[in-house]
Image: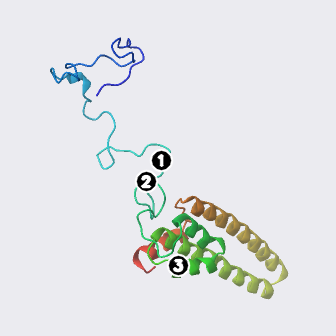
Amino acid sequence: MSYYDPNQQQNPQYGSGYPPQQGGDPYSGQQGQPNPQQYEQPGQGYQQPGQQGYQQPYGQPQPGYGQAGYGQPGVGEPMSINMQPNVAAGLAVIFGWISGLVFFLIEKQNRFVRFYAMQSILFSGAVFVINIILSIATGTLPSGVALALGCASSILWIAFFVGWLITLINAFQGKTFKLPVIGDLAEKYVNTGSF
């Protein structure tokens, strides 16, 4: 295989920047001896996925959870509902555990959508339960501790909003985004059916 070298002279026969072909005229049917320099050396050049030493080119989407090779998530996986996987995953996140539960129950096949639905259930459910506990503790403890718990509750809601927004954006874009602990639990449940 020969490569274009801008420092080489142009081939007058073809008017291109490619060097003259070695090994005979390709149009006459006569083939000369192959030029050993025109073939790549072992370990150089492009390698196909699956070969030893292959690295994914920078900027290309990594095959992630629910992705069949490159491209959109869940492509190649069947869907129970007539919807694009990224739209279904985004809608599963949008209303927290309520929409997560709805999409988890109606989508039985696509693991990408089921992952986002379960992550939404666990994330918003955990924040909801922790906030209830903080509210009860705030009402029963002395005022100094109650004030500290009120601040903790506010910080919790801000953290929830930021996490929800990042998850929502990634779901609609078709990217896999796992929250630190909850994402692992959701993935484990979708893969095995138990925590």
Residue 171 position, x and y percent, is 57, 63
Residue at image mark 1: 60
Badge 2 or badge 3: first in the primary sequence: 2
Q: How dense is the environment of label 3, judged by Cα within 10 Å: few (below 14), some, or many (20 and up)? A: many
Q: In this orientation, does residue 126 appear? A: no
Identity of the residue drawn at 42% across and 80% down: 193
> Hey, what amino acid is under mark 3?
Phe
Colour scheme used in the picture?
Answer: rainbow
Q: CB under 8 Å between callouts 2 and 1? A: yes
Badge 1 or badge 3: first in the primary sequence: 1
The residues bearing labels 2 and 3 have C-alpha atoms spaced at a distance of 25 Å
Query: Helix, strand, or loop for circle 3?
Result: helix
Q: Nearer the viewer, residue 86 or 180?
A: 86
Residue 26 position, x and y percent, is 23, 23
Residue at image mark 2: 70
Q: Residue furthest front?
A: 28
Residue 55 position, x and y percent, is 38, 45
Q: CB under 8 Å between callouts 2 and 3? A: no
Q: How dense is the environment of label 1, judged by Cα within 10 Å: few (below 14), some, or many (20 and up)? A: few
> Hey, what amino acid is under mark 1?
Gln
Residue at image mark 3: 104
Q: Nearer the viewer, residue 153 or 20?
A: 20
Identity of the residue drawn at 51% across and 72% down: 82
